[in-house]
Image (cartoon, rainbow, N blue to C red):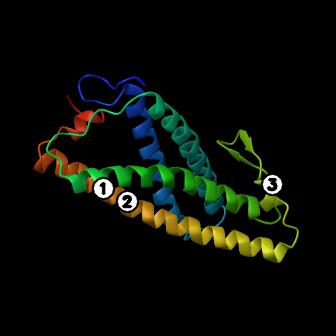
Amino acid sequence: MKASTQSGRYTRVAIVLHWAIAIAIIHNLAAGVFMGEARAPRHTGMMNWHVSFGMTVLVLTVIRIVWRAMHKSPPLPGGMKPWEIFLSKFANFLFYFFMVFLPMTGWAILSANPPGRDFTVWWSIRVPQIAPLAAIEDAGYRLRVKHQFEDIHSMGGWILIGLLLLHVAAALKHQFKDGHPGFQRMGIGR
């Protein structure tokens, strides 16, 4: 396993992946909150963007997990309390979980949506339906399954919003109250 850069910063690839995923997540959380109010054709346009960003998050997260397995993260700043270290690692796990879980539940929603058809991301890449969901023949049952996945997806989105707010609050606390160079570790400043 390769170590991170000697400066205590994450690798350039990890930093780019972090910010690309963050931008896509923030876009999708905002779209998810406001999409319910939109009417067609605006809703359809928003949904196309939402799906494209969501599947991008899934792909970039898989790349990030592989990258992280091959490149050790820089050590946490000294002086962190044991509970802060635990919360940091737990929050990190939750982020990775939701960065996979939310796109997968979104994919399940599309797959269970009658009449069912493959969909595209970025208006060009065809994504097939999840076969067991697409195989449900009873349209009423399939619609109930879709609604269950929508509820789960929505709840997960709200949890991720809370997690994101905690993440930002922790980064600000460590940077400005504790004097840790957290922003610099993620590529902001020197």
**Image position of 145 (left or right of 38):** right
Element assignment for label 2:
helix
Q: Mark 2 highlights which residue?
A: 163
Q: Amino acid at mark 2?
A: Leu
Estimate how packed mark 3 is, as few (under 14), some (14 to 19) or many (20 or more) residues with alpha carbons within 10 Å. Answer: few
Mark 1 → mark 2, Cα distance in angstroms: 11 Å
Which residue is nearer to you in this view: 60 or 67?
Answer: 67
> Residue 152 placed where, x, y %?
58, 68
Residue at image position (18%, 47%) is 80
Q: Is residue 52 left or right of residue 141?
A: left
Residue at 55 percent across and 50 percent down: it is 100
Tell me the residue that label 3 is attached to: 131
Residue at 17% in and 45% down: 175
Disc nearer the start of the sequence (1/3): 1
Do labels 1 and 3 touch, CB within 8 Å? no
How far from the left and from the top, in percent, is residue 143?
Answer: 76, 73
The residue identified by callout 1 is 87
